[in-house]
Amino acid sequence: MSTNTSDQNGFSRRDFLRLTFSLAVGTLLVPTDLVEAKRKSKTVEEVSESPDVITSLNDVGKKPKKLRTTSQIEAAPKPTQVGVLQGTQFKILDPNLTFRSQLQTRRRTDGIILHHIGGSDKEVSAATVHQWHLRNGWHGIGYHFMVHKDGTIERGRPLNKTGAHCSGENDHTIGVNIVGNFQYARPTAEQILAAEILLSNLCTMYRLQPGMTTIFGHRDFNRTECPGGNFYSVIPELIDRTKVRIEQYKEINEKLRDGK
């Protein structure tokens, strides 16, 4: 039997377990470019008409026409865990939600589905969404993660449990909600960077190759506008950035193994 524990992406079994543990306790691998993203973004809300759909992540964080800035009605929750890499802090929060009954464990994971809140572009917490979904008669929040406008990530439904976010696809996918209404507004630069980091970690954990057959928008499966045209249109570019980040992780781990 071979003693080589590295997988085909260049991650050792120890690296894989470290990534798994980091998501479990609330830390993520983070580059220094989060600091720059923090300087670029403003929160926007719907006014009356939809702006042109963005087609490049270069436009993310810019204020679209017919949108105005707004104060956040419900501020994103403060993090209880902070992960640090290369001197940059990245926030992730566990809201400690209580579910109505025992959740079913997901037997396989071969995809990630992206969502938005829709209806309103106001900031909203995982606890609030949890209450919405409880009122629907569900066990609780259906998403596994929520990415807030300031880049904070909240955990929702436990990562290893079956979600309730995409009809017909819940038993094999992870649900990630990017907070906002992206039929009208645009995701912030912080949200895009946080989503990129989260997706790269999830793809590494579950050994998924980022692509159009592993990362989807909600509308790819159900009759819905979710995750909004302004976000859906840049998912291919987000996937490309996720691939690049995974390669960066690979290079870092190879250098660590080589003692460089």
Image (cartoon, rainbow, N blue to C red):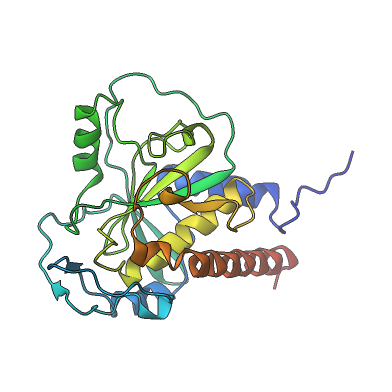
Q: Residue 255: x and y, percent?
A: 69, 69
Q: Residue 65: x and y, percent?
A: 21, 80
Left or right: where 256 falls relative to 106: right
Q: Is residue 113 above or below residue 186?
A: above
Q: Quick one: 233 or 75, which is closer to the camera?
A: 233
Q: Residue at x 46, y 34 (%)?
A: 170
Number of numbered markers = 0
Q: Quick one: 132 or 161, which is closer to the camera?
A: 132
Q: Quadrant of the C terminus?
A: bottom right
Q: Residue at x 25, y 44 (%)?
A: 126
Q: Tell which residue pokes out farthest to the top in this image.
A: 101
Which quarter of the figure has residue 157?
top left
Q: Is residue 147 above or below residue 88?
A: above
Left or right: where 232 falls relative to 7: left
Q: Is residue 187 above or below residue 160?
A: below
Q: Residue at x 31, y 66 (%)?
A: 187
Q: Residue 243: x and y, percent?
A: 60, 65
Q: Quadrant of the N terminus?
A: top right
Q: Tell which residue pokes out farthest to the right in this image.
A: 1
Which quarter of the figure has residue 185?
bottom left
Left or right: where 89 falls relative to 200: left
Q: Residue 109: x and y, percent?
A: 57, 39
